[in-house]
Structures are given as structure tokens and as C-alpha cells.
Amino acid sequence: MEKSQPTIDSLPRRKFYAAAVFVLNALMGIALAIPAIAYLLVPSRKRQQDQWVEAGDVGTLVPNSPVEMSFRKSRVDGWRTISEKATAWVVKKPDGELVAFGPQCTHLGCAYHWEEKQNQFVCPCHTTLFSIDGKVISGPAPRPLDRYAIKVDGTKLKVGDLHHA
């Protein structure tokens, strides 16, 4: 039995189909690779935007009298942007300087409050006491209260990211 030899007419067609398959595979690979590379290398516009949020009016603050200010802050969770309520304890010092503390105790993240009679921040869960400048007076908290980055625009207080003290 003789093997059939490919004819001259059928050989270019096979090469054309093979080349077409390779080209289509390459195009699909490029189509998948471009968004992946862009995601990894191009910084997100949301991260580049200014993250300052207006928290309240500083004209009403009294020195050495902490005020809890509420504001809305946007947070990116996966592919969604979520607007959530946040708070800060804002203290105006006698020299006019402002400090904004995060609302959680640095021990286990409990919510603390200002006790006017004791002139201290009190965490009722584990009896940690903080001074008006956020330092630990007593209790199990390992460090001072966390602080927000702040700036004043006219009479409006703007808060940024929360940082460890």
C-alpha cells in the first residue's frame, strides 16, 4: 500500500489554517493580558484623589473641651465605593492648635467617651483612661489614641487618614 502524498493544493490551505489559529490565540492572549497589566501597573484614580473630608466647623470649638464630630467617608471595598459614617474626637488646645483623635480605644478598638468630671477620655470596656492629649494614663491600652491627619480650610475642619500615634 502506498501512502498518499499531500497534494500541492492542500498544503498551503493547512498552513493558512494553522497560522490563523496561532494568530487568533495570540490576539486572545493579548486581549486578556492588557487589562491585567493595566490593573497591576497603572495606579487607581481613586487612590490619587484627595482624601480630605469635611468634618465640621472649628469656630464653635472651646479650648480643652473635646467635641465628637461625625462625617461621611468613602472607602473602596473590592470594586465598590462605600460611603460610611465616621467620627473623630476633636480637641482645641489653649494655643489654638487642633487635634482629631480616632474613635476607637487602642487596646481592643472599643468606643471611648469624654468624661467632663474626670477631664479624661474613658474606655468603659477595660477601664483605660486617656488624657486630653490622647496619652495613656492607666489601663491596658498599649499606646496613645490614634490621630487623624487634619487641616483647616477657613473655619472648616477637614480630616484625612487615621495614623497611629
Image (cartoon, rainbow, N blue to C red):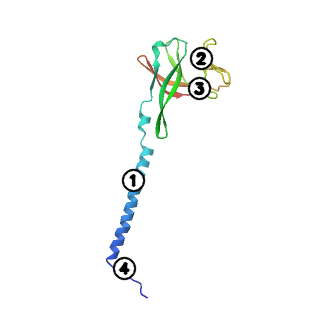
Q: What residue occupies the far bottom of the structure in this picture?
A: 1
Q: Amino acid at mark 2?
A: Trp
Q: Is residue 44 above or below residue 18?
A: above
- Residue 80 coordinates in the image, percent (x, y): 47, 38
The quadrant in which the C terminus is found is top right
Please name the residue shown 39% across and 59% down the image. Answer: 26
Spatial separation of the CA atoms under disc 2 and disc 3: 12 Å
As helix, strand or loop, the secondary structure at mark 3 comes to loop
Considering only order in the chain, which callout, 4 or 2, is on the residue closer to the N terminus? 4
Q: Amino acid at mark 4?
A: Pro
Considering only order in the chain, which callout, 2 or 1, is on the residue closer to the N terminus? 1
Q: Amino acid at mark 3?
A: Gln
CB within 8 Å, label 3 to label 4: no
Q: Which mark is residue 114?
A: 2
Query: In front of the other: label 2 or label 4?
Result: 2
Neighbour tally class for label 1: few under 14, some 14-19, many 20 plus, Cα within 10 Å? few
Spatial separation of the CA atoms under disc 1 and disc 2: 57 Å
- Residue 69 coordinates in the image, percent (x, y): 51, 20
Q: Quadrant of residue 104?
A: top right
As helix, strand or loop, the secondary structure at mark 4 comes to loop
Q: Quadrant of residue 105?
A: top right
Considering only order in the chain, which callout, 1 or 4, is on the residue closer to the N terminus? 4
Q: Which residue is mark 4?
A: 6
Q: Which residue is mark 3?
A: 104
The quadrant in which the N terminus is found is bottom left
Between 35 and 42, the one lying in front of the other is 35
Spatial separation of the CA atoms under disc 4 and disc 1: 36 Å
Q: Which residue is mark 1?
A: 31
Between 96 and 88, the one lying in front of the other is 88
